[in-house]
Image (spheres, rainbow, N blue to C red):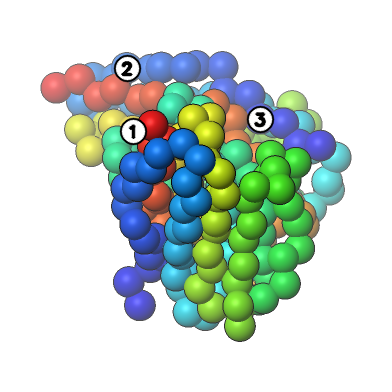
Amino acid sequence: AQTVTQSQPEMSVQEAETVTLSCTYDTSESDYYLFWYKQPPSRQMILVIRQEAYKQQNATENRFSVNFQKAAKSFSLKISDSQLGDAAMYFCAPLSGTYKYIFGTGTRLKVLA
Amino acid sequence: DTGVSQDPRHKITKRGQNVTFRCDPISEHNRLYWYRQTLGQGPEFLTYFQNEAQLEKSRLLSDRFSAERPKGSFSTLEIQRTEQGDSAMYLCASSARGMGYGYTFGSGTRLTVV
């Protein structure tokens, strides 16, 4: 069974600063992807970034990047130059051949002006 | 195509009543998923379809819950004899073939059972 642990229930960051959200996971699958989703208040979940587990190179999408440590099963999200619009719940989730996500409890990110 | 649509956005019902939610996925997506999310928690998997076939159901999905996806297009989730513990956000998502695409989520249906 897959499990996901997001040990930071809440994080705060000053606008324009950098913040890192941590995630550890456990899976017995050898072939999988890892995703970060963002859920703004009362709005739908949006895909932020994805990482293929067989790729060593860390994924980057504009201000968002990941630090993927496969052996440690760690998948952290770094947000650079934080903006007010980044305030949301962030969920990390592995996805394997079962095609279903197992989500953790998420991290609430507050961005301070 | 404007994404995944869910209807209604909000539903308030009395305990014991039946409710039905609808989800319209992205038209070219063959997989459709239902999740439930309670306040302060991550979404929990309920069930998923590949085309019209329901391939997996969570143990969370008691026999009061039923989901269908006729003709592999839209999907409905029905809850019979609602209970207060059913109050939650019900999320629908769809995906194309392949793990790498991830899901596209709808805005959800918020159910309140009074």
| Residue type of the residue flagged with mark 3 | Val
Q: Can residue A81 be seen in this snapshot?
A: no
Indicate which label's residue lies in the foreground, 2 or 1: 1
Image position of A113 (left or right of B43): left
Earlier-in-chain disc, 2 versus 3: 3
Report the residue marked by disc 3: A4
Q: Position of residue B55 (x, y in %)?
A: 76, 63
Location of residue A39 in the rendering, given as x and y in whole percent from the top left corner: 38, 40
Q: Amino acid at mark 2?
A: Ser
- Marked residue nearer the N-terminal end (2 or 1): 2
Q: Are labels 2 and 3 assigned to the same chain? A: yes
Which amino acid type is marked by label 1? Answer: Ala
Note whether residue A108 is visible. Answer: yes
| Residue B108 falls left or right of residue A85 | right
Do labels 3 and 1 touch, CB within 8 Å? no
Q: In the rendered structure, which disc, 3 or 1, sits on the residue that comes first in sequence?
A: 3
Which residue lies at the image location 40% right of the left edge and 50% below the top edge? Answer: B108
- How far is disc 2 from disc 3 in space, using C-alphas? 21 Å
- For disc 2, the marked residue is A12
Which quarter of the rendering shows the N terminus of chain B? bottom left
Q: Which mark is residue B32?
A: none
Q: Look at the picture and state if B63 lies above or below B32.
A: above
Please tell me which residue is depicted at 85% across the width and 40% down the height of the picture.
A28
Residue that badge 1 annotates? A88
Residue A82 lies, in percent from the top left, at: 27, 31
What residue sits 55% from the left and 56% below the top? Answer: B78
Apparent side of residue B5 relative to residue A1 in the rendered image (left or right) = left
